[in-house]
Each structure stands twice: as C-alpha cells, then as structure tokens.
Image (cartoon, rainbow, N blue to C red):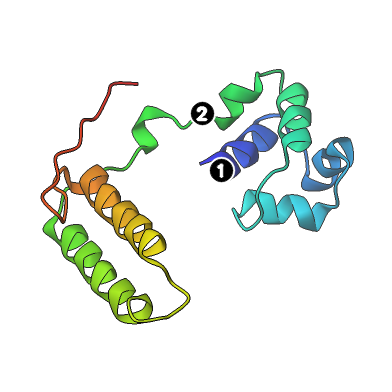
Amino acid sequence: MIHEKIKQLRIESNLSQDELAHVIGISRPTLSQIELGERKLKADEVQKIASIFEISPSELLETPKHEVKTVHTKDAHTSLKNLVLYILGKCGQKPNVGEIVLNKLLYFCDFNAYELTFESISGTDYVKFAR
C-alpha cells in the first residue's frame, strides 16, 4: 500500500515525520494520517514525495506484486450475494431509485464478485483482458 511505502521510504532515508512533512508542505499530523492510510494523497503531494525520494510518481503509486490480494473463497461469493439482496431490500422499492440506478448497482456487485471469485452472481460470463 502507498501509505506503507511512504513510511518505509521515510525511515530508510532517516527522515522524521516533521522533516518530511515540512519538505512536502503539510503538517506532521497530516503526514501521520497519510502513513496510517487514514488520508488520501493529493496529486501535488504525490509529485513532491516522488521527487523527494527520487522516484517516479508511478513507482510511488505502484502496488508490488506480492501485495496484490486475490480472494478465491465461497465466503466472498456468499457475502456479495448478501450484498445484492441487501441493495434490493433497501433500494428496490424506493420511488427515487430508478431501474437504471438499480441495474448499475447490481452490475457492479456482480462484476466485483467475478473479479474476486471468477464466478459471477448472475451467471454472466465476463471476459478478463490481460493488463
């Protein structure tokens, strides 16, 4: 994760949170939130941090291969089915939720199930292209 990477780079460079925060132009508590993953980075902050550690912004944002987590359990599939039922129960009968909104919510749940388990809730076949 990016927040762990920033902390690791800071420690390897023997910088305190105060020192790094000052160079970036943010407060130390803000940097602490970033390192804990409680605050997202702004685009200009990514640029500054990458420049400080002499790496490209894409290297900073890149997730190492060993950190990519894939879930292949039936528990994830069951959880997503329950999510679909929850969405239908909460939104299905609301007058301000149209058919298009409901279809989009269900599509995202279905596609997410496919990405996690390689099995869609609806039985739809998706084609996954190599990156």
Look at the picture and state if 21 lies above or below 66.
Answer: below
The image shows residue 11 at horizontal and vertical percentages of: 67, 37
Question: Can residue 71 be spotted in the picture?
Answer: no
Q: Quadrant of residue 52?
A: top right
Position of the C terminus, as image quadrant, is top left
Mark 1: amino acid = Glu
Look at the picture and state if 97 lies above or below 31.
Answer: below
Of badges 2 and 1, the one in the foreground is 2
The residue that label 1 is drawn on is 4
Q: Residue at x 29, y 80 (%)?
A: 89
The residue that label 2 is drawn on is 62
Q: Residue at x 38, y 59 (%)?
A: 100
Question: Can residue 64 be spotted in the picture?
Answer: yes
Density class for disc 2 (Cα within 10 Å; few <14, some 14-19, many ≥20) is few
Along the horizontal axis of the image, is 51 left or right of 120? Answer: right
Q: Residue at x 20, y 37 (%)?
A: 126
Determine the CA span between mark 2 and mark 1: 12 Å
Which comes before the other along the chain, label 2 or label 1? 1
Q: Residue at x 37, y 28 (%)?
A: 65
